[in-house]
Image (cartoon, grey):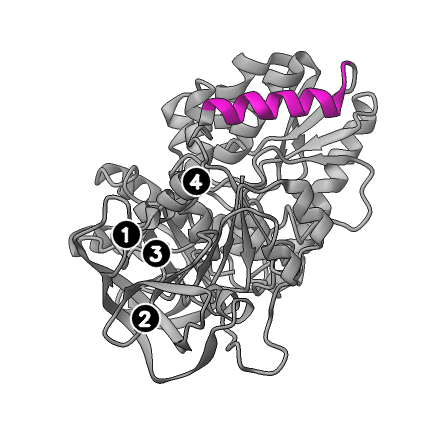
Amino acid sequence: MIVILDFGSQYTQLIARRVREAQVYCEIHPYNIALDKLRALSPAGLILSGGPASLYERDAPDVAPELLRLGCPVLGICYGLFVIGRHLGASVAAAALREYGPARLRIDESDPLFDGLEGEELKVWMSHGDRIVEPGSKLVVIGHTENAPYAAVRSRDGLWRGIQFHPEVAHTPRGARLLANFARLVCGEKGDWTPANFVAAQVAALRARVGPEERVLMALSGGVDSTVAAALVGRAVGARLVCVFVDTGLLRFGERERVERVFRPMLGEGLVVADAAALFMERLAGVSDPERKRRLVGHAFIEVFEQKARMLGGARFLAQGTLYPDVIESVSVKGPSAVIKSHHNVGGLPARMKLELIEPLRELFKDEVRAVGRELGLASEIVEREPFPGPGYAVRIVGEVTPARVELLRRADRIVTDEIAAAGLAGRLWQSFAVLLPVKSVGVMGDGRSYEQVVALRAVESLDGMTADWARLEPALLERISSRITNEVRGVNRVVYDITPKPPGTIEWE
């Protein structure tokens, strides 16, 4: 594998994506990982990420010298370059001119990193306030830009490389090739991390962990993640898998009926439906804080699963479709990156659980999960389904959650879903949905004054949910949706459209 050491860059996960796109497995770990743990991973190469710090600041993050002397190739990106420079005797200082934006890289010396890129002036993306001012005797320059004379360097022994630009972002068009070159040509990885190999490895690992007799409960929501996870676990343990669908009362229109229609023929008695709407509404009563909502939902789910485990004969394991974005946005287990929000199935879980978690998709992005689903033979209507939050409408109702507000949002959201599908956009958009706001507005309805709820529309395009852009929907489509909601959903007199990308916003409002 390739190990990425995270210095807190907002782009660290993009580095991992680009490496995986080259069919090379990689993992992200904090920059201060213990030496024995890193050695146990036996990395074929290390990538040091960028980060928000300046190397010359007091207490700037650094790595132990031994971490860079494992004998495997090392690539430093931006801040990672400066870390490498410090360890090899280069001089690093604040740049006279900070550089945020496009630049042109000129290749000065042939290197496997630039295989297939030679002879080009590469468009790259800079985002830094420091620079190497003197490379010292152990580094040679292999590329420069107008403002960065040491924009790409290599150690004389050929093991260490550093680049000042960000190859992982879309603004560096050939950056994916550069990272693939590092993983395959410099580190010697074969590029055989495929969905088929992932499935084989996970099935073997699941069988080893669960054993030949233990039963597994699967938290099945009917969405992509839990369905793929269920198929994967089912391949490993067969009939010892029991899928539990929890009707929280916070689901889309007809969701319970859809899950029974789709999964009952496949699972038979292996599908258990738990009607827990009263429990979830009781726990959420009077709660407006989004973090508290997520924690309460997470705890309520576990209560239901533990109850079902007792009823079904004491299953030891609980499987769920946790993905990598859930993990990195919830808790900083992979590095010093900031917590964005607690996902109900990660940061929202109780500290003490009677069931052991199985999360076979924990290190995957959404598009990788879909590829695994196709490998497992799942139908396209399941694999391509748009994401829906585990807490459901609890996090699409801004403010207090009540049965009346849930029903109002469910009706508005159904209109959004129907109109997006009728426009042929369901497959192009990452998500499209309605949000109920905690404000009322004055309107005119039926020649009289109204003072009713406001609904926000959200439609975004994305590859993995880590970043997203708002969808440029046709005005006529927005008009139809707005007109239908205000006419058909009693209690709503105003509809607005959210045009915030991620970042700075998140896809969900809470």
Query: Is 198 within the magenta?
Result: yes
**Extent of the magenta region:** 196-212
Q: Which residue is drawn at the image coordinates 44% and 21% (left, top)?
A: 375
Q: Which residue is drawn at the image coordinates 41% and 77% (left, top)?
A: 134
Q: Secondary structure at mark 2?
A: strand
Around disc 2, counting alpha carbons within 10 Å, would you say few (fewer than 14), some (14 to 19), or many (20 or more)?
A: some
Q: Which residue is drawn at the image coordinates 73% and 41% (left, top)?
A: 302
Asked whether disc 3 touches disc 2, contact meaning CB atoms under 8 Å apart, the reply is no
Give the residue at mark 2. 443
Asked whether disc 4 touches disc 3, contact meaning CB atoms under 8 Å apart, the reply is no
Q: Estimate the spatial distance between the alpha carbons at disc 3 and disc 2, rounded to whole Å.
A: 50 Å
Residue 272 visible within the image: no
Q: Estimate the spatial distance between the alpha carbons at disc 4 and disc 1, rounded to whole Å.
A: 25 Å
Give the residue at mark 4. 20
- Looking at marks 4 and 3 on the same chain, the residue that comes earlier in the sequence is marked by 4
Q: Is residue 94 left or right of residue 206?
A: left
Q: Amino acid at mark 2?
A: Gly
Give the residue at mark 3. 167
